[in-house]
Amino acid sequence: MMGLALKRLIDIVVATVALVLCAPLLIAVATAILLTMGRPVLFRQERIGLGGRRFTILKFRSMTTDVEGRGTTGDGDRLTPLGRWLRDTSLDELPSLWNVLRGEMSLVGPRPLPNRYRFRYSPTQFRRHQVRPGLTGLAQVNGRNGLDWDEKFAYDVWYVEHRSVLLDLVILARTARAVLRREGITAPGSATAHEFLGSAQQAGCAAPAPLPVAAGEAAR
């Protein structure tokens, strides 16, 4: 319980300080997007969060809209030069600090995935939602999009089973190194990441029921 409280306190303090210190950078990036891509500046998408609950993630927009990108063949065609740079430097993730402040995400945890993946998880894979999704996670510092989905989920479940404040600090330190080195930004043969198709969907299985949330987590 103390570990959960300390983790949440760290999330609040770091997200608040980062948003304040990065305010000029946030304004500069938003202005650059507005001038080069127009509106909207922010990318919003429904993701799966703690206990299987849905939330809307905020990121800087890095691609043309569906209308602007009509006739393109994939994400690689819709990714703009500015958007590619934002992804390479992970600056597109800065607005997600607001999700951390709101308690929808944590600094460290399994990366939040689109809600359309909900029916594609196996029960074991769905265990990743026993904790808040994170800005970074164990999979992100061990290959990121260079990993296949089985490897990513294995890291996510291992994190759920072994999570601690100390482990979070180690992951944050390794994240800084990975960002500076721009490691694992794209999947092999893709401009972003391959879609998770899963096996549950193919077998006609229903998604696992939302996970029970510990009282200490639900209160935060």
Image (spheres, grey):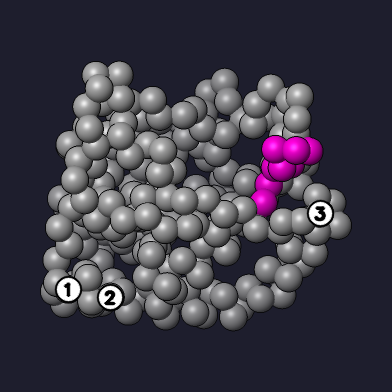
Per the image, is 64 magenta?
A: yes
On the picture, is 192 further left or further right than 27?
A: left
Q: Residue at x 86, y 57 (%)?
A: 35
Give the residues drawn in magenta, as a range: 61-68
Label 2 sits on what residue type? Arg
Secondary structure mostly seen in the magenta stretch:
loop
- Image coordinates of residue 164 in percent, x first then y, are 21, 62
Q: Quadrant of residue 134?
A: bottom left
Q: Which residue is mark 3?
A: 38
Q: Which residue is mark 1?
A: 216
Looking at the rendered structure, the secondary structure element under dot 1 is: helix
Query: CA separation, marks 1 and 3?
Result: 42 Å
On the picture, is 85 further left or further right than 49?
A: right
Please name whichever residue, 139 or 216, is drawn nearer the observer in this view of the structure. Answer: 216
Q: Which residue is mark 2?
A: 220
Label 1 sits on what residue type? Gly
